[in-house]
Amino acid sequence: SQELEQSPQSLIVQEGKNLTINCTSSKTLYGLYWYKQKYGEGLIFLMMLQKGGEEKSHEKITAKLDEKKQQSSLHITASQPSHAGIYLCGADPTGSNYKLTFGKGTLLTVNP
Amino acid sequence: GAGVSQSPSNKVTEKGKDVELRCDPISGHTALYWYRQSLGQGLEFLIYFQGNSAPDKSGLPSDRFSAERTGGSVSTLTIQRTQQEDSAVYLCASSPRLALNTEAFFGQGTRLTVV
């Protein structure tokens, strides 16, 4: 089975600072999803990456998938309190588009 | 409503009791997904419904778990003879077609605590 490891498990940054969250897979990734979750809320889709070397951006959040397709990074530039939450990476090991395997998440706190 | 609605938002039940969790998807969404999120296991796939097709139940952890979707709309997840390890947040999502991307919306979840 495919396992995803996220690092760090938690992160505290000062508002305005940049940060990076990593997601490493035990197997080749054939679809890597990034979600954000705030306490008491459902998941919010951020981005999906499929091709090696692919990079996508949404507002101040950029996600990359490495060439070997076994690691992804999520980078936030000039963090804001609104970025706080749990970031989850998910993989689609069977190409089902619905049966995702997730990492344990990274808890981000942004101090004003 | 405008989003995916789940009820109850919180449920505390005694070990051995049966519980029913409800999900009201967004109107017109044919795909419906159940996931659960627990401290030990993280987020796990449970079951997927797509229109009138047979659901993919491969993620259900035991035969105490069952789910149905009536009329292609509301879905109910039933857990029989609940155990403490069933304690988790149960999340439901729906989408107009098969895709857990920008078109999929998650509900706020049902927090189940088995005591």
Image: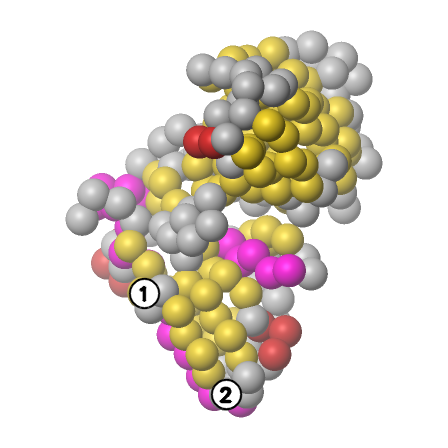
**Residue B22 appears anywhere in the view:** no
Residue picked out by circle 2: B14
- Mark number, residue A15: none
Q: Chain of mark 1?
A: B
Position of residue B72 in the picture relative to residue A112 (left or right): left
- Residue B25: percent from left, percent from top: 29, 50
Task: Residue at 36%, 64% (x, y): give it.
Answer: B9
Identify the magenta region.
Answer: B16-39
Please tell me whether mark 2 sits on a helix, a strand or a loop. loop
Q: Earlier in the sequence, mark 2 or mark 1?
A: 1
Q: Amino acid at mark 2?
A: Glu
Q: State which quadrant residue B97 falls in.
A: top left
- Residue A33: percent from left, percent from top: 57, 30
- Residue furthest toward the front? A112
Q: Indicate yes or no whether the magenta region holds residue B24.
A: yes
**Residue A47 appears anywhere in the view:** yes
Task: Say which of A29 and A110 sits in front.
Answer: A110
Q: Amino acid at mark 1?
A: Ser
Please tell me whether mark 1 sits on a helix, a strand or a loop. strand
Task: Residue at 68%, 18% (x, y): give it.
Answer: A65
Residue picked out by circle 1: B7
Q: How many marks?
A: 2
How far is disc 2 from disc 1 in space, using C-alphas?
18 Å
Q: Is residue A3 above or below residue A24?
A: below
Position of residue B26 in the picture relative to residue B65 (left or right): left
Task: Say which of A13 and A19 sits in front.
Answer: A13
Task: Say which of A81 and B83 sits in front.
Answer: A81
- Residue B69: percent from left, percent from top: 33, 61
